[in-house]
Amino acid sequence: MVQLLGPQDRLLRMLEKEHPAVDVLVRGNEVTLTGEPDAVRSAHKLVDELIELTRSGHALAPSDVSQSARMLERSEGLRPSEVLGEAILSTRGRVIRPKTPGQKEYVDAIDENTIVFGIGPAGTGKTYLAMAKAVQALQRKEVERIILTRPAVEAGERLGFLPGTLTDKIDPYLRPLYDALNEMMDPEIVPRLMASGTIEVAPLAYMRGRTLNSSFVVLDEAQNTTPEQMKMFLTRLGFGTRMVVTGDITQVDLPTAASGLRIVTRVLKDIDDIHFSLLTSDDVVRHSLVGRIVDAYTEYDEQRTAARTEREQAAEFANRAERRSGMQRPGPRDRMPKRGLK
């Protein structure tokens, strides 16, 4: 009951927030729900799922209560205890697990396919879950090494000439991957694994000419690859290797070229053993504001696209009208006055 209610009854207050029409009374080991029958049934399902999670050893957080309530409300066929109860990795007292049905589908796809594309907005756990699966595969000796790569493209800024060695120059581009590695593994072990080549973090340009065997390869920020770079990367696939490609097609930083991630979704969509997981704002697990920010920008982009389409259609209609009027306009001879014969 202590785990179910949380410290200072924090989880109990979250339960009441999710179901404001239900009165929740706790006495000893009994939870009494009072209110309209439909509201009570909904709250009862949520309490049952939270109890199941605590019995499985899951340390509940307020976000788990809200995520569980959201899953039950959508009735997507998956129980919260099935989604939140599946642990990928346990490290330093933290458990990494999928937190939404979309994330669970993404993680299951990584287990079942050789190449998986995780496409979605910021905060959906694309890269973090992929790296957790990579570390899990290494610990289980399913692969011999982990290779993490991303294109070295500035996010709308010109950084200019960076001082230092080659490693110093490319380090800012790869820093997010290092940060995630240090969260999932002992920071003292990571340098030794990198020195031995068991873990490699490198820019995408370093992949050319290689064949990657018995590896778990993660390509991050794939929306900033050109079509040629994407083809180059995918053809590095060797025996016993799995690849996960992550990116957000709404955040392309390439100055002119088309995004290789956008094109590959059309080129490889019908090939077996390649899976595309499309994550949405419903799968955002950062601050609740992030999901609302993503939705606001999505709506703004849709409005801009609709306005652009409307302008193009209006211009095309005007051009057609002008061409038709030009065809019907009298020529110079027709405009000359007719003279009688003498």
Image (cartoon, rainbow, N blue to C red):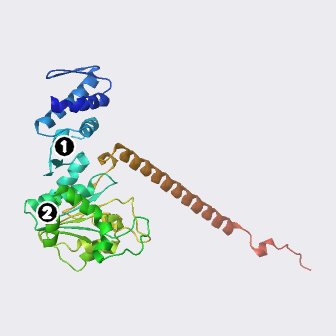
- Quickly name the residue at label 1: 84
Q: Distance of mark 2 from mark 1, alpha carbons? A: 28 Å
Q: Amino acid at mark 2?
A: Ile
- Vertically, is 244 above or below 287? below
> Helix, strand or loop at disc 1?
helix
Is residue 245 visible in the rendered image? The answer is no
What residue do we see at 44% from left, 70% from top?
158
Quick one: quadrant of the C terminus?
bottom right
What residue do we see at 25% from left, 62% from top?
177
Does residue 342 appear left or right of residue 101 in this picture?
A: right
Is residue 64 visible in the rendered image? The answer is yes
259 vs 327, nearest the viewer: 259
- Vertically, is 240 above or below 125? below
Tag 2: Cα neighbours inside 10 Å, few (<14), some, or many (≥20)?
Answer: few
Q: Determine which of the numbered discs, if any, sits on residue 217 in the image.
A: none
> Helix, strand or loop at disc 2?
helix
Q: Determine which of the numbered discs, if any, sits on residue 189 in the image.
A: 2
107 vs 97, nearest the viewer: 97
Does residue 230 appear left or right of residue 84 in this picture?
A: right
Tag 1: Cα neighbours inside 10 Å, few (<14), some, or many (≥20)?
Answer: many
- Vertically, is 342 above or below 92? below
Total marks placed: 2
- Residue 304 spot, x, y in % from top left: 50, 54
Which residue is situated farthest in the right direction here?
342
Does residue 176 appear left or right of residue 299 in this picture?
A: left
